[in-house]
Each structure stands twice: as C-alpha cells, then as structure tokens.
C-alpha cells in the first residue's frame, strides 16, 4: 500500500532503516554473557572471597582426657563427666575436639593466615573459673620441658621430628587444685586471636 502512494523509493528507505536498527541491536543481544550477568559475577566474587578468607575449624564438641582416660565429654549441647583434682596437686588434661559426626577433628588440616601473613596456631581459651579454687597452666608442657631439658634432649629431638611429620599439635593444660570446692570453666578453641569454637556448656571442676 505504501508503494502505491509513495513509490518504491519509500519502501527501500524503510527497509534500510529496519536493517540499521537490527545491526544496532544485534551486539546487545549477543554480548550478554557471563561477564554481564550480575548473578554470575556475585558468585565469582563470593568464591574468590572464600578462597582468600582464613579457614575455621568445624567442630561440634570436645573430650577431656586425664592419663589417657576420658573424664569429660561435651557434644552438640550435651555433656557428661567432669574434672576432679586434689587440693595441692596438679593433673595434666588433654583436649580432643570432635567433628559433627563425633570423630576427632584433625586441626592440622585447617590452615589460617592473619593480616600479616603469619600462620594462625590453635590454642585453648579457658576462663570464667574461680581462681581461688583452681589454677590453670596453659604452658604446662613447656614448664615440664624446661625442668627436664638436659635429661631428655635426645627424646625431645625425636618428639619434634614426629611432630613435624604428623603436623598435629597437642592441646594440653595443667589443672592445679588450690582448695576444696567446685567451679566451672568456659572452654574455647582459639585460632590465632579469635575463637573457632566455644563450648555451649561450662566444664564442671571439683577440688577434693
């Protein structure tokens, strides 16, 4: 109908305009890939952030052992047992942390780096107890080592070799009874300067 009123020239002009519009829109249609998708970009940034962020120990509980015997267990909000020490005596307590399935957590497999690029070590955070009833020595092993350093140099070197081979660090503390009574300990697994785990329940301690 347009050709009848305006001639073939008008029809050619319309065709050229439509072709020009199509060529202009085509790059926009073909260029919407992953880099233009805000959802894809967010996922990529999230993955990169997770890769750079320090890892955390995923633990749901812990066990305390004295003389290689379990005396206390806390797991997923329940606990049983407790620590007992005589007044004037000290015991050595080993802490073993547990994963969600109840198996021992391998803390040596969790790496962490602080803002200065230094590796973050695991340690124990023990607080909230009555210091008039008990005393806690977090450097218990170091104290014993200093007392027997000359006598056990060879054994100590062998122990260091084993420690380097397995990469697992024991978490141990000394518990000294000062006077008869009861108290409780807030128990934490520290990773560098922050806690990766805090016990939901306080650990009961009895001094006889």
Image: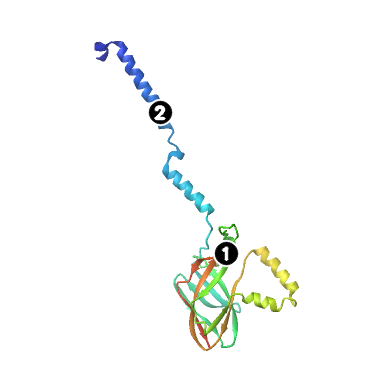
- Nearest to N terminus: mark 2 or mark 1: 2
Q: Image quarter for residue 156?
A: bottom right
Q: Which of 179 and 107 is in front in this view?
A: 179
Mark 1 residue element: helix
Marks 2 and 1 in Cβ contact (< 8 Å): no
Residue at 48% across / 46% down in the picture?
44
Give the Cα separation between the discs numbered 2 and 1: 55 Å
Residue that badge 2 annotates? 26
Name the residue located 50 percent from the left edge and 51 percent from the top edge: 49
Percent position (x, y) of residue 57? 53, 63
Q: Where is residue 33 in the image (x, y as percent from the top left)?
A: 45, 37
Spot the residue most to the front: 116
Secondary structure type for disc 2: helix
Residue beneath disc 1: 107
Q: Position of residue 68 (x, y in %)?
A: 60, 77
Q: Residue, x 72% and y 76% (percent of image)? A: 149
| Residue 37: % across, % down | 42, 41
Q: Residues within 10 Å of mark 2 (few under 14, many from 20)?
A: few
Task: Look at the image and name its color scheme.
Answer: rainbow
Res 34 → quadrant: top left
Q: In which quarter of the image is the N terminus?
A: top left
| Vertical placement of residue 202 versus 178, above or below | above
Question: Number of numbered discs present?
Answer: 2
The one nearer the camera, 107 or 151, is 151
Q: In this image, 191 relative to 141: left or right? A: left
Residue 181 sits above or below residue 11 on the image? below
Q: Tell me the crowding category of disc 1: few under 14, some 14 to 19, or many 20 or more residues within 10 angstroms, Cα based.
A: many
């Amino acid at each position: 109908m347009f050709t009848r009123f305006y001639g073939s020239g008008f029809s050619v002009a319309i065709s050229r305009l439509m072709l020009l519009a199509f060529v202009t829109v085509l790059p926009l249609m073909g260029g919407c890939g992953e880099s233009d998708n805000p959802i894809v970009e967010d996922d990529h940034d999230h993955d990169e952030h997770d890769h750079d962020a320090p890892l955390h120990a995923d633990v749901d509980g812990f066990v305390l052992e004295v003389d290689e015997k379990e005396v206390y267990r806390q797991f997923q909000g329940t606990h049983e047992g407790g620590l007992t020490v005589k007044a004037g005596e000290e015991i050595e307590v080993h802490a073993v942390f547990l994963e969600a399935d109840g198996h021992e957590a391998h803390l040596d497999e969790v790496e962490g780096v602080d803002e200065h690029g230094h590796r973050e070590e695991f340690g124990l955070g023990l607080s909230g107890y009555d210091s008039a009833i008990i005393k806690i020595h977090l450097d218990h092993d170091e104290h014993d080592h200093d007392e027997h350093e000359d006598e056990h140099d060879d054994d100590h070197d062998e122990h260091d070799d084993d420690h380097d081979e397995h990469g697992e660090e024991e978490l141990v503390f000394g518990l000294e009874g000062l006077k008869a009574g009861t108290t409780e300990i807030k128990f934490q697994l520290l990773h560098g300067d922050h806690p990766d785990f805090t016990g939901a329940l306080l650990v009961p301690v009895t001094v006889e």
